[in-house]
Image (tube, rainbow, N blue to C red):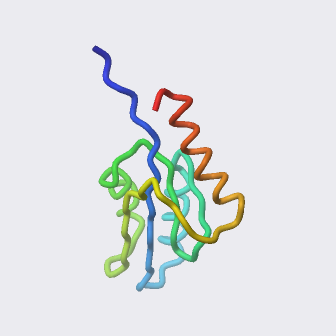
Amino acid sequence: MAEAQKQYRVFFVCYRQKVADQQKLENLLQAIKETDGWAMYFDSVWFLATKESARSIWNRLEHHIAQGDYLLISLAGKEKYGTLPPKAWKWFESVDKANLQKGG
């Protein structure tokens, strides 16, 4: 039997740069933007839509942070409440629809 296709999941990526290094920051941003889908509505917090695991995301990003910086990658839950721009809610909805369209 074929392995079930992985679904897109949304992760929060939170970053705090303690060591000023503009090149590392630019490289981190580029690595984040290489994810299947991403959005940013808070300073230093990104939402990533991906089929990767948190560990896999970490493995891609860890080389782009300086020693002493903080980086947290956490799986977001299905329940979401708050105040965001309408396009943010549409982005979350599009991730959910991508899963439905792909058998999720």
Q: Residue at x 39, y 34 (%)?
A: 6
- Viewer-proximal residue, 32 or 86? 86
Q: Residue at x 51, y 36 (%)?
A: 99
Q: Tell me which corner region of the image, top left, top right, bottom left or bottom right, holds residue 39.
A: bottom right
Q: Residue 49: percent from the left, percent from the top?
A: 50, 49
Quadrant housing the N terminus: top left
User: Relative to residue 72, is residue 2 depicted above or below?
Assistant: above
Q: Residue 41: percent from the left, percent from the top?
A: 62, 69
Q: Residue 100: percent from the left, percent from the top?
A: 53, 33
1 to the left or right of 87: left
Q: Tell me which corner region of the image, top left, top right, bottom left or bottom right, holds residue 62.
A: bottom left
User: Relative to residue 62, is residue 19 depicted above or below?
Assistant: below
Q: Residue at x 49, y 64 (%)?
A: 28
> In the displayed image of the protein, which residue is found farthest to the right?
86
Q: How many marks?
A: 0
- Viewer-proximal residue, 4 or 26? 4
Q: Residue at x 70, y 66 (%)?
A: 85
> In the displayed image of the protein, which residue is found farthest to the top?
1
User: Relative to residue 72, is residue 95 depicted above or below?
Assistant: above
User: Relative to residue 23, is residue 8 depicted above or below?
Assistant: above
Q: Residue 87: percent from the left, percent from the top?
A: 71, 58
